[in-house]
Structure formats: structure tokens, C-alpha cells
Amino acid sequence: KMSSGAADLRQRKKQNCTESDKMAPEERNKENSKLGRSPKYMLIQRFAKLFFGCLAAVTSGMMYAVYLSTYHERKFWFSSRQELEREITFQGDSAIYYSFYKELLKAPSFERGVYELTHNNKTISLKTINAVQQMTLYPELIASVLYQASGSEEVIEPVYFYIGIVFGLQGIYVTALFVTSWVMSGTWLAGMLTVAWFIINRTDTTRIDYSIPSRENWALPYFACQVAALTGYLKKNLNCSAEKFCYLLVNASTYTFMMMWEYSHYLLFVQAVSLFLLDSFALAQTEKVHEVYRIYLFSVIVGYLLQFENSALLVSPLLSLVVALMLSKSLQMNMKKSTFVSRLLKIMYIYLVLTVAVTLNFLLKMFIPHKENGHLLKFIEVKLGLNTTKNFTMNWLLCQESLQAPSQDFFLRLTQSSLLPFYILVLIICLFSVTQVIFRRICGEPLKETVKLEDGRIGERPEIVYHVIHTILLGCLAMCLEGMKYLWTPYVCMLAAFGVCSPELWMTLFKWLRLKAVHPILLALILSMAVPTIIGFSLWKEFFPRIMTELTELQEFYDPDTVELMTWIRRQAPVAAVFAGSPQLMGVIKLCTGWMVSSLPLYNDDDLLKRNENIYQIYSKRSAEDIYKILTSYKANFLVIEDSICNEVGPVRGCRVKDLLDIANGHVVCEEGDNYAYSKYGRFCHEIKMNYSPYVNYFTRVYWNRSYFVYRINTVISFQS
């Protein structure tokens, strides 16, 4: 019965698709005849609109990519720097990603390079890692293949090729947002406004300024393409060709997105929840939504296989939710068979799906061995105030700006660019309209096949409802963690631009106001052109001079102390040496010198987190002997002390590295609300500079400048008086 029901469903879908293809031209011909327009004239008009819209979208993306490239050059003086000085601009985890790209290019063959990355024992001392799996290095694999296959070795330097690809992807990102807003509003004026808001609020829409190789800069453009395709796929009365194209694009972009970012399945989970709520209230075609669920399912399977059987995907909330939804599909199909039963099942459906999903996820975690980030759950507990901890890693994460609640400056910037007020206006109108539609559905009123402008029912369009739910869910996350704003703000730009450019939204508002003084349709059409035009001119007047100043102003970025340190390591340190220090600095040392290090700025591996905490003890109040034992346990030969960490004066007391270490080590005593540091040893990073026993017994200073002190770790301890 189920198979025959599914076959009937597919057959109805094909029939509806065919009927819409046949009926659409007839309806258009009737409308054109009423207006006195020939079908040929309308075809030319539609083609011109499509051509100029696509041209504007592509041009916007290309101009943004050029803008990023120019700004990057002005900021770092890239073209006038030596290779070492260029590489120093990659900080933290960015340095690690680019270092593996360099290693792939230096390998005798691509196959050999991949093998060395999957069996890497030349990066972290005493540890062999599968770098491709652990760090999601598929972007670097693709970049290296393209660089070598395209014969670019004689044309462009590897670093320019690498950052050029990332800037190009950012151009695709902007183009996808442009297209999404265009598809929703029907005018590419909305796309232009989306791009303008995105660039003006660049501080809050992208991290490209601070971390070019980061995984989200590679992955989010594909997610934006997926969202654009999904927007078109959810539209009603879509002809078969367009529907198939959107479906294929959703497939391809979802698979690619899954491979580019280890946390992609969490973002797809948020999207799946949005589609689940959309489908629960029967606001979209069920078969379309379930096709997207199948795409999720196959993406997880493909990701599991290509990511070296990554068990984290099998225990992901996305897989549990999708399986629960597909198991509950038969129940949802029965919702439309009886009025009383369907209403009762609608109430129970959401509860049932969530219960099945949570239970399934719990069972999968019980029976499938996995290394899912357990520290993330602990972090959430502490963040929500459900637990307290003295653990250094947890408290260090809590102190990171990206994991704090968003600051007032964030909302002030969005308000100054007029983005936030218009977003709130559009969101309120859409929410009220969606609420009305849901109430009508509960009362048994069917949705209209085609929503006309004069109906003023923007909440009946499934793609609009999806975006409203999606931005609300992402907004809730952004209100908790400032780092999530980079996922939320781009879609705020898109939704706000769509709203002010959409006659349907203004018509929906006028329907509620029962406007009679002026013809509402005429006023809605005027406002949908006038409001974005006024916004555009005001943004141009206020922000365009600032953007041009950014591009013409030469910024000085030079770090001579780090350059001197890297030069000394290259010339003086033995090839087999292992360096120890802060994880961020170790990433730069690995990139610039190629020497082995004892830790890396990676936070998805419990062993590396423990290493980082142990090596950070060089800034704690521990004895020379304790530090010596820690460093020699990781076979370290050289220790690098950073003066900026040792003498850190942070804006928030208690969030400095040395403060967090004192708390974790129990070197802080609380009395009458005041904190007092207590230890029988002085702070190691200070004491070692004094050059007295017992520190000189274990460590010998071999290099120093204003920012760094390098010590050789003695293999034979000499006890001096």
C-alpha cells in the first residue's frame, strides 16, 4: 500500500508539473491579449529582464571579489612583501590550512601528497594524524589540483592562486544572495540592495578580513547557492525545467557544502528544522520537502564515506531528524484523510517526530563508537549556567569574543546602515501573515493555488515562510553567540531587501490597514520601487565614500619581531627540532619554517586540547621542574615565550591566559569577593628570564627580541649554584 501510495504521489507530481507547463502559456496568452501585447513582445521582455538581472548578479559578485582583493592588497601590501612576510599574515588555524596546501604542491605527485596528509607524522610530535579528515582539507586538495592542472605555476604564485579562489567564492556567495532576493521579490533591485547591505555590514557578514583560509569561507558560498536553489524549488507553479534545475543544484551544493566544513551538518540541521515546521503546517508541497530530506540523507552517507568513515555524521542531529521525519511520513499522509483525525494528528505530529529523533540520536550514540566533540556539550552546559567549571579549556572558550553574546555595537552598526529596522518591519509583516495562514489551515481552509498581488497574502508563499523560519532560528543562535552572526546577518540583508522591494509585502500591509484613500495596488507598486531607491541613495551618500577611503588608504601591517624569529629558526634550529609554545604561534612556525611543533590551534580533538592546556602551563605559576617534565614528555627541543601573553593586560580581568591557568591550577584564593593569586612559585614566563637556578639548569636562552624569548630545553641537566 505504501509503495502504491508513493507511486500515486509521484504520478500526481508529474501530472501537476505537466499541467502547469501546459496551462502557464495559455494563461499568459490570455493576459497578454487583454493588455494588447503579443506573445513575442512578452517573450522579449522576459528575456531582457532575465538577461539584465543575471548580468547584474554576476557583475555584483565579480566587483565584490575585486573589492576584497584590492582591500587585502592595501591592508597587507602583499605584492611588495617577501614570501615569509606574506605567510605571517596567516594567523592561528589559517596558517595550518595554508601550510598543508604548500605541502601538497611540494609533493612529488598528488597521490603522494594525499598519502602524506592522511598519514601525517611530521606536524605534531609523537602523533600521527589523518589531516584530511581531522581538518577537512578538501578545499586544499581541490586548490592544489586546480593549480597544477591549470598550468598556473608559471603564471601566478601559489599564495595568490589560493586567496584568489577564496575571493572568487565570496563573489559567488554575494551572487547567490542576490539571486535569492531576486527570486523572492521578482525584481533584481532587491538583489542590488542585498549586495549593498552585505558589503556595508561586511564586519558582521563575513570573517574574510581576519581568516581567509577558514572553513566557513570555503563552505558558506555553497550553502548560499543551496539556499538560492531551494528558494526556487519551493515556489508554487514552477515549470518542470526550472524545478529540475533547482533540484539538481540543491543536490550538488548540499553535497559540496557537506565536504567543505566539518560543522556543515549542524547548519543543515537548522535548515531541516525550518523545512519540518514548514511541512508540519502543510504550507509547502510535502513531496518537495521530502525530496530535500532524501538529499540530506544521501549527503550524510556520501560525507561519511568520503570523510574516512566519519562517525560524527552518523550521530549527528541532522541524520536522526531526517530518519525520524521519513519514518513519520506515512502518518503525515494520513493527516488529510479525515477532518477530526487530521487535526488531532497535527497536534501530535511535531511531538512525535521530535521524540523519535531524540530517541534515535541517543541510541546511535550508544551503539556507534564516535569522537563527537564532547567538550561542545560541556561548553553549552556552562554557557547556559547549568554547570560551573575551573577547566582551562572551557573557560578559555567562554572568554572568546565569538562565543560571547553579541555586543551593543553590533546592533548599532546594523541600525546605522538601516538594515535592522527594515528587517524587523519585514519580519513582523511576514510573521503576522504566516500566522493568519496557519490559523486558516487549522480551520480547514485550503491554500490558494496561485496567490495574486491583490490578495495580500504573502504568508502563503512557501519560500517566504521558509526564510522567515530560517532567519528566526539563525537569529536565536546569533543572540547567544556572536560568532553565529556571520551565518545570520547575510540572510537578514537578503530578507530585508526582498521585503522592501516586494509589492506583495506592501499589499499585505495595506490589506490589514484597509487603505481606501489611494488604490492599494498602485501604492504597493510605487513603494516597492521608491523605498529601495531612497534607501540605495542614502546608503550611497553615507557609505560609498567610506568604502572608497578603505580602498585608497594604505595600511601598515608589519611584524618585524615575528619575521626575525622565523628567520632565526630557519637558519639556526636543527631540522629535527620540535618547538613548543602557544598553539597560535605554533601554527605560524609550522607554516613559515616547516619545523615540527608540539601543539596546534585545533579544538576538535580532545588530545590536542589537553596538549594545548599542558603547554600553556609555561605562563602559569609552576616550578621549572614541572614545566620541564611537561615539555620533554612531548619531545620538545625549543620553547618560545611570548611577551604579549606573559605580560598580557586584557580588557576583561579573569579572561587572560595567566588568570585562567591560575584558576585551573587552584592558585587563586577568593576572600570576601576579592581574588588573590597564591603559589609558592613565581610565574614561569617571568622567572625564566631572570637566568638563575633552577631555571638555567633546565633551559638555555638561545635567542630573544622585543616580543619573543627562545630557550633550548637541555637534554642533560646541569645543576648550577
Image (cartoon, rainbow, N blue to C red):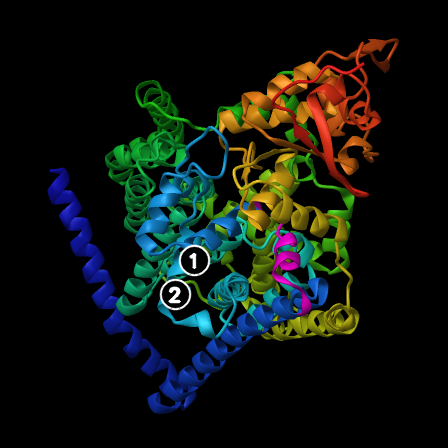
Residue 130 image position (x, y, % from top left): 39, 38
Residue 49 lies, with reference to residue 389, above or below; the image says: below
Residue 255 percent across, percent down from the top left: 34, 51
Are the residues flagged by discs 1 and 2 in contact, CB closer than 8 Å?
Answer: yes
What is the magenta segment's predominant secondary structure? helix
Residue sitting nearer the eye, 683 or 184: 683
- Examine the structure image and report whether residue 597 is included in the region drawn in magenta: no
Residue 662, image x and y in percent? 75, 18
- The mark found on residue 105 in the picture is 1
Closest to the observer: 18 or 196? 196
Question: Could you tell me which quadrant the C terminus lies in?
Answer: top right
Q: Residue at x 63, y 26 (%)?
A: 615
- Marker disc for residue 148: 2
Q: Looking at the image, tell me whether mark 1 or mark 2 is earlier in sequence order.
A: 1
Residue range of the region highlighted in magenta in the rendering: 80-94
Element type where label 1 sits in the image: helix
